[in-house]
Image (spheres, rainbow, N blue to C red):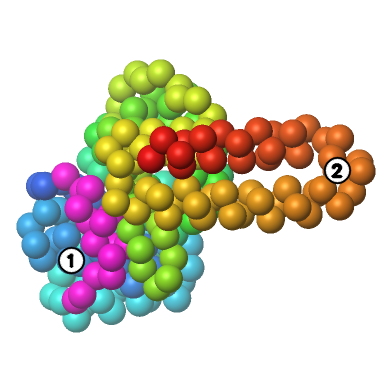
Amino acid sequence: MQLDARLAAIAAFVPHGTALADIGADHAYLAATLVMKGIARRAVVGDLSAGACAAARRTALTQRLTREIDVRQGDGLSVLTPGEAESIVIAGMGGALIAEILSGAPVVLTSVQTLVLQPMNGAAKLRRWLYENGWDIVDETLARAGGHLYEIIRAEHGAAELPDDVLLHIGARLFEKRDPLLKAHIEGKIAKLTRAAGGMNTSAAARQSAEYRETVSLLAALRTMLALY
């Protein structure tokens, strides 16, 4: 199986020899690849959708991995028992939903060493949750696939100082290591916020809102960071 750039970047953040859980795993291509390469000893694949679980089971059967990959239908981390997973991947969901999933299973997370997260949006909210709940973002990367730019976060247990708001949006580690796709990443966020500010600017009431002030302030900060790049 050939992983696209997004899944390959996620796979690169999974520790070698781990017991893996992939939540919202769809066809289980990631878990199957990691098991076949010996990166994951075993994997639990969880998804709320019966169709996705059926597709994941077909992948496990086709690749002769039914002993190593356990597919379970369920909501979030409810498919796991404490101590079962050393690494958890949650990808392809909104950042707020990922934070909600993590918040709902503190006992399961106690024994988890590594989180590999790929939010489709709301990355700043997810980063804030991690920093405020005993997780340190140890690495981040960007991947381009299918015309989209994806943020991938690797977190481990640890205390870390909460970065400035602009770095929560960009990714402090991404900015620190000057990821090759960082310029495009910042430019994309500027373009999105510029559209949002333009829409609010047409309404006098919106221009007086806290959301408008926050958007304009963040835009200015992002433009400053882009200039520093």
As for residue 20 lying within the magenta part, the answer is: no
Element at label 2 = helix
Which residue is painted at 19% across and 81% down in the image?
A: 62
Residue type for callout 2: Ala
Establish if 211 lies above or below 94: above
**x then y, percent, for residue 200:** 80, 49
Q: Is residue 218 left or right of residue 1?
A: right
Residue bounds of the magenta highlight: 1-15
| Distance between the alpha carbons at the discs numbered 2 and 1 | 49 Å
Mark with earlier residue (2, 1): 1
Tag 2 residue: 206
**Label 1 crowd (10 A; few <14 / some 14-19 / many >=20):** some
Q: Nearer the viewer, residue 227 or 176?
A: 227
Q: Nearer the viewer, residue 164 or 90?
A: 164
**Residue 111 seen in the figure:** yes
**x then y, percent, for residue 152:** 35, 49
Q: Nearer the viewer, residue 28 or 142?
A: 142
**x then y, percent, for residue 144:** 35, 63
Residue type for callout 1: Thr
Which residue is painted at 37% across and 76% down in the image?
A: 54
- Report the mark closest to the observer, 2 or 1: 2
Picture quarter with the C terminus:
top left
Establish if 64 lies above or below 143: below
Tag 1 residue: 33
Establish if 51 lies above or below 95: below
**x then y, percent, for residue 198:** 75, 52
